[in-house]
């Protein structure tokens, strides 16, 4: 029997600096979401869902509106749980 050489289905690469990303739709719009493994998380970020810090070494997600190309001003770093619960929570008060 001949061997079948079929191309594998791989998620499309969104933007050159965005890395591997996926699209998500929700009541709050369409988003491009990229997972960041803990080993690649080297900086501290503030999660917009809970207003707590995401420490270096903690796995999280980066999301930006699907109609944008992921510029630095559009991307937001979220805890995974906060991202999944974003539609069930109200906005947090921003710390200054």
Image (cartoon, rainbow, N blue to C red):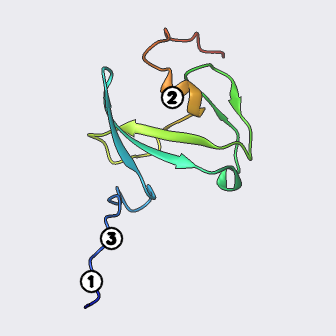
Give the x, y percent position of residue 95: 65, 15
Do callouts 3 and 2 mark residues in contact (Cβ within 8 Å)?
Answer: no
Tell me, for residue 8, which label it has, or none. Answer: 3
Disc on the earlier residue, 1 or 2:
1
Q: CA distance from mark 3 to mark 2?
A: 29 Å
Mark 3 Cα within 10 Å, few/some/many (few <14, many 20+)?
few
Q: Give the residue at the far front of this rendering.
A: 1
Tell which of 42 and 84 is nearer to you.
84
Q: Which is closer to the viewer, label 1 or label 3? A: 1
Q: Is residue 7 above or below residue 38?
A: below
Relative to 43, is 25 above or below? above
Residue visible at 29% across and 88% down in the picture: 3
Residue under circle 1?
A: 4
Q: Are marks 1 and 3 in contact (CB under 8 Å)?
A: no
Residue at image mark 2: 83
- Rounded to the nearest angstrom, the CA distance separating label 1 from label 2 is 40 Å
Q: Secondary structure at mark 3?
A: loop
Quadrant of the rendering where the C terminus is positioned: top right
Indicate the position of residue 88 as horizontal and vertical percent values. Answer: 46, 12
Observer-side mark, 1 or 2, equals 1
């Amino acid at each position: 029997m001949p061997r079948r050489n079929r191309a594998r289905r791989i998620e499309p690469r969104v933007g050159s600096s965005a890395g591997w990303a996926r699209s998500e739709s929700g009541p709050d719009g369409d988003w491009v979401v990229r997972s960041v493994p803990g080993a690649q998380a080297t900086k501290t970020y503030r999660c917009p869902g809970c207003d707590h810090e995401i420490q270096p070494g903690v796995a999280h997600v980066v999301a930006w509106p699907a109609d944008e190309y992921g510029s630095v001003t559009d991307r937001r770093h979220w805890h995974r749980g906060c991202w999944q619960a974003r539609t069930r929570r109200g906005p947090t008060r921003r710390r200054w």
